[in-house]
Amino acid sequence: MLKLLVVTAHPDDEASFGGALLQARDRGAHTFVVCLTAGQAATHRGSATSDEELAALRRREFERSCEHLRVTESCVLDYPDGRLDRQDLWQVVGELTKTIRKIRPQVVLTYGPDGSVTAHPDHGMASLFTSAAFQFAARSNRYRDQLFDGVRPFQPQKLYYMTSDFTLPERQPVSLPPATTVVEVGDYVQRKIEAFRKHTTQAPLFPLFEEHTYQKGTKELYHLAALARTVKQVEIETDIWQGVEDLP
């Protein structure tokens, strides 16, 4: 069974990975999304009158979006929105390491440490946490306390960072990783937009998301950040599953 894990920072981030998620499901893979925060620090708050109300609303929106993207399993963790850079690295990486060991995905997607085109610090921290967990999950000398009740070390085969071929001049400067994998997602673009629209608290951002989605055309761009097998040269890919073995 092929498995894909996507790690994001906020509810609504999953829509940006929507093409890969939908394509994976059409291939019969199981898909998983882990969101690190409930997005309670968002500027746009809908009808919420407190951070707690906003978090509850955004969790429900996340569930509806993931359902629209046909995600097999999804969850929102409880780390503070806007403060991922101040969290205990060992703790967050440990939680993601345990997730990888339990799910056992062949492919992991997340943002790059740049924070993507928005340069959001939480996006960059999601990348750093996920990158460390990708490496640590296979090592028996990391988080040994997790290795019981059938949980054992596991090495995913590929780690990708989402990237882009444009930047946003009104945001902080970013140095985007070069695209090594260009995935055709034309059949899924409209569904990605529909998934983002499930996040009704973020309605003021709908035009911006659509503009950036259409600016990417029918492609999602990824950077192959880590590969479990040794290669002399990375090839330009059109498929995140290229070279992946279907392992138990």
Image (tube, rainbow, N blue to C red):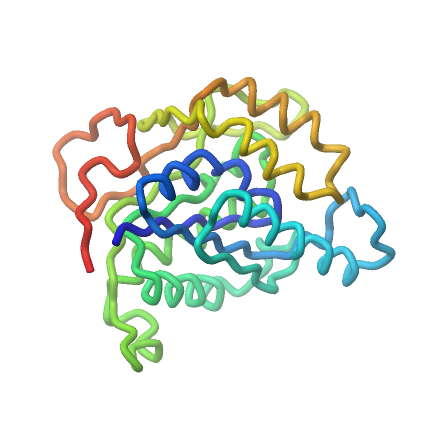
Left or right: residue 224 versus residue 215 is: left
Identified at 28% across, 43% down, the residue is 226
In depth, the one of 137 and 13 nearer the eye is 13
Quadrant of the rendering where the C terminus is positioned: bottom left
In depth, the one of 114 and 191 nearer the eye is 191
Q: Quadrant of residue 167?
A: top right
Residue 163: x percent and y percent? 44, 30
Quadrant of the rendering where the N terminus is positioned: bottom left
Total numbered labels placed on residues in the image? 0
Residue 137: x percent and y percent? 30, 62
Identified at 70% across, 25% down, the residue is 207
Left or right: residue 153 versus residue 103 is: left
In depth, the one of 45 and 225 nearer the eye is 45
Vertical order, 144 against 95 (above or below) = below
Identified at 29% across, 26% down, the residue is 238
Left or right: residue 20 versus residue 169 is: left
Vertical order, 117 against 7 (above or below) = above
Residue 162: x percent and y percent? 44, 35
Identified at 25% across, 62% down, the residue is 154
Left or right: residue 116 versus residue 177 is: right
